[in-house]
Amino acid sequence: MKTIGQILKDARIKKKYSLEKLENTTKIKREFIDSIEKENWSLLPAFPTVLGFVKSIASSLGLDAKGVSAILKRDYPPRKLRINPKPDVSSVFSWSPRLTFFTGLTVSVAILLGYLIFQFVRFNSPPRLIIESPKEGQEISGNIVQVFGSTDLDAKITVNNQPVLVDSDGKFSVSLEISQETSEVVVKAVSRSGKGTAISRRIKVN
């Protein structure tokens, strides 16, 4: 039983057609014609294109295109499907208890480190200090000036070198005795690490 390649080659030789002549007649590259005759399917395009080539060649050689097409379908090898016997399931994401544990651990460590860094920076930073009274250049009548403001809870406050208590809200207040020679009120806040913040306010005593 002849194969499709043998049938087409025998018909071409019988008709005394060279590959070049058949190429000119069918407008199909001689390389493709030669591959069909030798049945080198790997060198040819997809099956629908090869089927069109075979029908055109059959018509040019006086063969029954329908019958030749049936033989091609018989001889054309089926496409081999690439089947992986062991599918790669590692690429499929799956949330597991182990992943939950490590995620929780990572988050906990990150929070702890963030807290420690925050405390370290806070410990080594000068304390916050806000003076609400007196204002810069404020005129004072009498021998008392009210000094008050706010700072960090753990800071120590002095007003003109006099210690002042800080309440649970970080606020402080003191009535400072002054004289005609007093021209400045200096408030200092010192943290536990020894970092200090100082604010001075010039005043005018009448």
Image: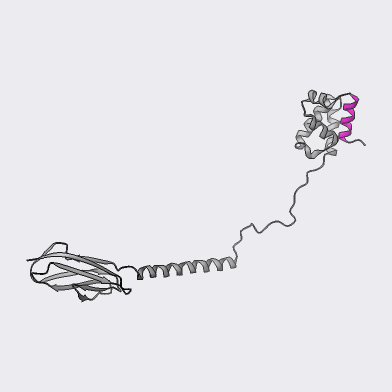
Quadrant of image for the N terminus: top right
Residue 20 occupies quadrant: top right
Q: How many marks?
A: 0
Where residue 115 appears, as percent x and y from the top left, is 42, 69
Where residue 39 appears, as percent x and y from the top left, is 84, 37
Q: Is residue 22 above or below residue 41?
A: above
Q: Is residue 6 above or below residue 108?
A: above
- Which secondary structure dominates the residues rendered in magenta? helix
In this picture, residue 47 sits left or right of residue 115: right
What's the magenta region? 3-14
> Please, which residue is most extreme toward the right here?
1
In this picture, residue 100 sits left or right of residue 36: left
Query: Residue 13 colored magenta?
Result: yes
Where residue 44 appears, as percent x and y from the top left, is 77, 36
In this picture, residue 55 sits left or right of residue 168: right
Residue 98 occupies quadrant: bottom right
Query: Residue 43 colored magenta?
Result: no
Q: Which colouring convention does the figure follow?
A: one colour
Where residue 132 appears, as percent x and y from the top left, is 20, 65
